[in-house]
Image: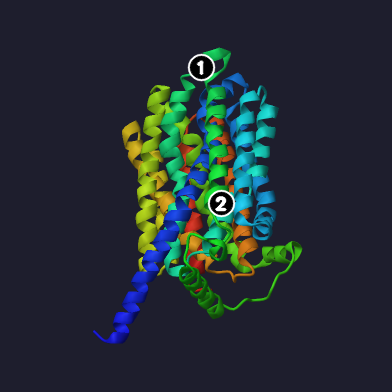
Amino acid sequence: MSSQTKAIDADEEYARRLFARIGMRCVPVLLAAFVISYIDRVNVGFAAITASKDLNMSASDFGFGAGLFFLSYMIFEAPSNYLLERIGARIWLARIMVCCAIVAGAMFFVTTATQFNIARFSLGVVEAGLFPGVVLYLTYWFPKRFRARYISMFALGIPLSSVIGSPISGLLLGMDGILGFKGWQWLYILEAIPALVIGVLIWVLLSDGPDKAKWLSADERAYVKDALARERAAQPEQGGHTSLLQQLKLLGDPRVIVFALVFFGTGVPSYGLGLWLPQIVKSFGVSNLETGLISAVPFICGSIAMIVWGRHSDRSGERVWHTVAAAWVAAAGLAACFWVTSPWLALVALSVSAAGIYAVKGPFLSAVSESFSSKQAAVGIALVSSLGNLSGQFAPWMVGVIKDSTGEFQPGLLALGLCSLAGGAVMFLRRGKS
């Protein structure tokens, strides 16, 4: 082995260790933030088991109201990312978590369907920007060759929120009648409190970027900055957008349109399953606690698949086929639910679909972050995410309407699968484009 080869290997080992340490500092608190915010986002699925009757809401009413979160999220997501870049990630992400705690806890006081809709819309306003903001924040720290694994670790919060939240939500529903309050009211207020704690931890533990990371040595800060600078130098800036209105011109960019379509197609099954799975499992004829425990199983499978597939994508340096394959596995699992009759076979099919749904996240989000120049990244990522997150408005409403029309969940699951199939197809057709 030549001395030059040894030097390259030593540098790569140094980089691996350094970025692993950075990951251990930044990712756990961000993961915790996303888990908690996502629990506050989707715990309506559990609350609806009893709250829908108390609030006199049909399945389609619930689906519409639950989806309002994503409408406001879409509207305010790009401005949120713009402000994050200018105010600083630490302050802005902490602000998001504290506001999420306040609004999510206010769901405790909801007494009508109209109030439910207002609260869901308000939650989307204050939480807007968390997901794309963190994806952007991770680009401040990690070069492309390490990015998918750490984005996957953060996005792990989506299935992990259900792995953790499902059993807890099932237990909290059992508090019905304590101090005269409903179980779903206790669920909302108790699951909102941790967001306050995480907001404080973000303020204390995070730095806005490598320049301000006092927990790194001067040489380590320089290494990170140089690694990212080399990547930026190799990537054309494609024009500088200096104001938010100028950056919103990216709405017409083909990259934004295509990636948003993929995000939408693969996001529909993610949100559809996340918001309706508790009621699907409850229809198996099990208790609230059993519903929580069983609902966690598909998300455990999704969590494992997300980490394994994200690392595989990083090792190969490939994003497109990793996205397409995962999207089509999700479609196959959801389609199988249409034909199986056994609840336990349905659980297997749902677990397969969850593995595909969540394995998409790391490779796809890495592809998005790698497609925009540093000047365009903040708004480019936010626009893709906000437009794609319309799937969160569409998915629960679609499943609710189909459930009201047919009386069954299976046709709705098939529709979710077709959306995932279409999302994968759009990514497949994009292959080879920059």
Q: Nearer the viewer, residue 251 or 366?
A: 366
The residue that mark 2 highlights is 131
Say whether residue 291 is left or right of residue 204. Answer: left
Say whether residue 43 is left or right of residue 124. Answer: left
Secondary structure under tag 1 reads loop
The residue that mark 1 highlights is 176
Crowding at dot 1, Cα within 10 Å, few <14 / some 14-19 / many 20+, comes out as some
Query: Is residue 284 visible from the viewing direction of this image?
Result: no
Say whether residue 100 is left or right of residue 297. Answer: right
Residue located 41% across and 68% down the image: 318
Secondary structure under tag 2 reads helix
Q: Which colour style is shown? A: rainbow
Residue 211 screen position, x and y as percent = 56, 66
N-terminal-most mark, 2 or 1: 2
Q: Quadrant of residue 322?
A: bottom left
Quadrant (top left, top right, bottom left, bottom right) of the N terminus: bottom left
Vertical placement of 70 versus 111: above or below? below
Residue located 50% across and 59% down the image: 365
Distance, label 2 to label 1, CA atoms, is 33 Å
Crowding at dot 2, Cα within 10 Å, few <14 / some 14-19 / many 20+, comes out as many
Residue 68 screen position, x and y as percent = 65, 39
Residue 312's label in the rendered image is none
Residue 69 screen position, x and y as percent = 63, 41
Residue lying at the far left in this picture: please name it: 1
Residue located 62% across and 62% down the image: 378
**Residue kind at label 1, given as amino acid type:** Asp
Residue located 44% across and 33% down the image: 166
Vertical placement of 224 versus 134: above or below? below
Query: Is residue 60 visible from the viewing direction of this image?
Result: yes
Residue 414 screen position, x and y as percent = 46, 43
Q: Are marks 2 and 1 in contact (CB under 8 Å)?
A: no
